[in-house]
Image (spheres, grey):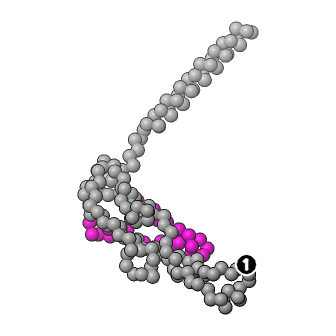
Amino acid sequence: MNLQHSKLDATSLIGQLVLYSVLAAVLVVFANWPVYHQLGPDQALIKLSIVHEPQFVQACRQRTPEELAKLPPNMRAPMDCPRGRSDIRIQLEMDGKPLFETVMHPTGLSRDGVSTVYRRFEVKAGTYRLAARMNDNLVKPDFNHVKEAEVTLRPGQVLVVDFNPDKGGLFFQ
């Protein structure tokens, strides 16, 4: 009986080894095939990725002594600052032709949060005149942030269009 029991163990062990080998081979094949390419061989990527807190719609104002007297003692802040923020208008042009345009709305119940946009544009590699314009205060009709530059995109390159007031506003990276 021991001999038969050891034959069963050897057969079981060999069967497991074959099964695990087949599973490993399947994993290796599908880990490397089919080959995935994010972009075509002559493609580049432009990413517009902006998270920005726009201007307030109305400026803060000083409350009069009469207004303060009417308020409960715990609500007597000397400044009245409305919470609503402006929409943000954005334009992206490539070689003088519109690539993207939108109006972003502030988040939050009181429309006092950030505005966010994220878009991807696959383009052929090459040299382009890129222009990004943004207005974060729609009370004024003109764009108050503008960035224009000639950019050369290599195949597989990713160019990010972003906004940072500490870096001078709109920038390409």
Question: Which amino acid, mark 1?
Answer: Asn
User: For mark 1, does the 10 Å Cα neighbourhood hold few (<14), some (14 to 19), or many (20 or more) residues?
Assistant: few
Q: Is residue 6 magenta?
A: no
Q: Nearer the viewer, residue 166 or 145?
A: 166
Q: How many marks?
A: 1
| Coordinates of residue 145 in the picture (x, y in percent) | 38, 71
Query: Which residue sits at x=63%, y=81%?
Result: 78
Is 110 situated above or below 46?
below
Query: Which residue sits at x=47%, y=37%?
Result: 31
The range drawn in magenta is 93-121
| Coordinates of residue 9 in the picture (x, y in percent) | 67, 16
Q: Nearer the viewer, residue 33 or 145?
A: 145
Whether residue 40 is visible: no
Quadrant of res 121:
bottom left
Q: Nearer the viewer, residue 145 or 43?
A: 145
| Coordinates of residue 115 in the picture (x, y in percent) | 50, 68
Q: Is residue 110 magenta?
A: yes
Q: Residue furthest bottom?
A: 66
> Which residue is under mark 1?
74
Q: Which quarter of the rendering shows the N terminus?
A: top right
Q: Secondary structure at mark 1?
A: helix
| Coordinates of residue 158 in the picture (x, y in percent) | 36, 53
Whether residue 144 is visible: yes
Query: Which residue sits at x=26%, y=66%?
Result: 95
Q: Which quarter of the rendering shows the C terminus?
A: bottom left
Q: Nearer the viewer, residue 119 or 106?
A: 106
Position of 57 with respect to 120 (left or right) is right
Is 134 situated above or below 13?
below
Q: Residue furthest front?
A: 65
Query: Which residue sits at x=66%, y=12%?
Result: 7
